[in-house]
Image (cartoon, rainbow, N blue to C red):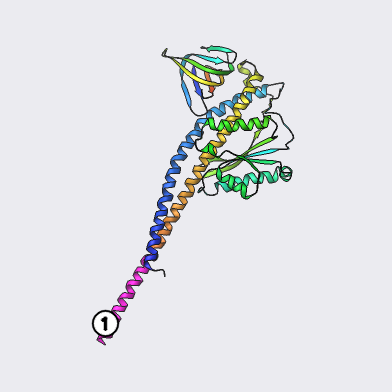
Amino acid sequence: MANLKEIRTRIASVKTTRQVTSAMKMVSAAKLKKAQDAIFRIRPYAEKLHAILDSLSSSLKNTEESVFTQHRTPNRILIVLISSNRGLCGAFNANIAKTAVDLANTKYKEQLISGDIDFLVVGKQGEKQLRLRRMNIVAQANEVFDNLDFETSTMVSNNLMADYADKRYDRIELVYNQFKNAAMQISVTEQFLPVELKQNDEEKDSVYNFIYEPSKEKIVEELIPRSLKIQFYKALADSFAAEHGARMTSMHKATDNATDLIKELTLTFNKARQSAITNEILEVTNGAEALNG
Amino acid sequence: MFLEILTPEKKLYAGEVDSVQLPGTKGLFEILKKHAPIISTLDKGRIRVIERSKRMLYIEIGGGVVESKNERIIVLAEPA
């Protein structure tokens, strides 16, 4: 059995660790709240925008194609992987990197073999994971998480749209963790570009007889880039909240584990102390008996 | 009429209003009570709102789109 002093230091060190993990848990909980609020604020905007866009595009007879709705044979693919800058959040980053690599391995197998898949990563951890798997990373945008707002997100999404418009890529996919609740993230893959517009024949808004200014086509043209920016911002915000949720859960588990460990160690410590005392008493009584004898 | 002005990051305005003047792409226009349903894109500029209490206020936007139907106006704005 380990000696008393050793166990005592062990207990002290586990206690310090527990303090750190529980503090990190608190910090993540606070950040999660903030990130969640951001999602709730985007939601009504995104929903309304999509509603307008859907009702417009479905009533458009002549689909005069905007550059973002153009379908091309997918020769060059860009996969945008949204991960996190910091670790200590469980399998968060490993999972999402795996989803991205799986996507490349299955849906875009041919392009992967011919080396036509590029990756853009957001988050240092995802970058690390992809490097391990020897994927072709062309750019990173790790700094967007330093101060996540619509403006910084727009700079990145504008670049993506420009790349698509310049035909540098024929398809752009987004891979990110969607925030379900604090303990759950869902790895999702979304096609970012080209945009799939809904094409159904029934005109839902025809009852209103809207006036369109300047014209339906112009509005759709104007709204598509806007909805793309929103989609990208939403993905970032979702991933950000999911990250903090994941970190909170994993730090919670770590704190629990530390508590269990401390319990166990205290038990061993007490046992060792008790047996040391028993030993001492035995020695004393033996000694006394030897003297009397 | 109920007016809502939203940006992706926050709600700029929500409340009952008498009139809204908007910087439409085809020119400045005003929505009053019983305006026909309209969807219009907006340019960078400012929105003039006259509230029920006749208080007038201006809100800067960096472009956007407006939908108005059934006495309900929703402006999806870009941050100015």
Residue B30's place in the image compared with A175, above or below, is above
Q: Is residue A9 visible?
A: yes
Q: Is residue A50 visible?
A: no
Magenta highlight range = A267-293
Measured as percent of width and height from the top left, residue A182 is found at: 49, 43
Work out whether residue B55 or residue A135 is closer to the camera in this orientation and state it: A135
> The C terminus of chain A lies in which quarter of the figure?
bottom left
Quarter of the image where one finds residue A84? top right
Measured as percent of width and height from the top left, residue A34 is found at: 46, 36
Q: Residue A60 lies in magenta, yes or no?
A: no
Under mark 1, the amino acid is Ala
Q: Which residue is mark 1?
A: A288
Q: Is A283 displayed left or right of A89 in the figure? A: left
The residue positioned 45% from the left and 38% from the top of the image is A33
Q: Label 1 lies in what chain? A: A
Quarter of the image where one finds residue A173? top right
Residue A172's place in the image compared with A26, above or below, is above
Work out whether residue A123 or residue A17 is closer to the camera in this orientation and state it: A123
Tell me the element at label 1.
helix
The residue positioned 71% from the left and 38% from the top of the image is A76
Measured as percent of width and height from the top left, residue A235 is found at: 57, 36
Measured as percent of width and height from the top left, residue A30 is found at: 43, 40
Residue A7's place in the image compared with A28, above or below, is below
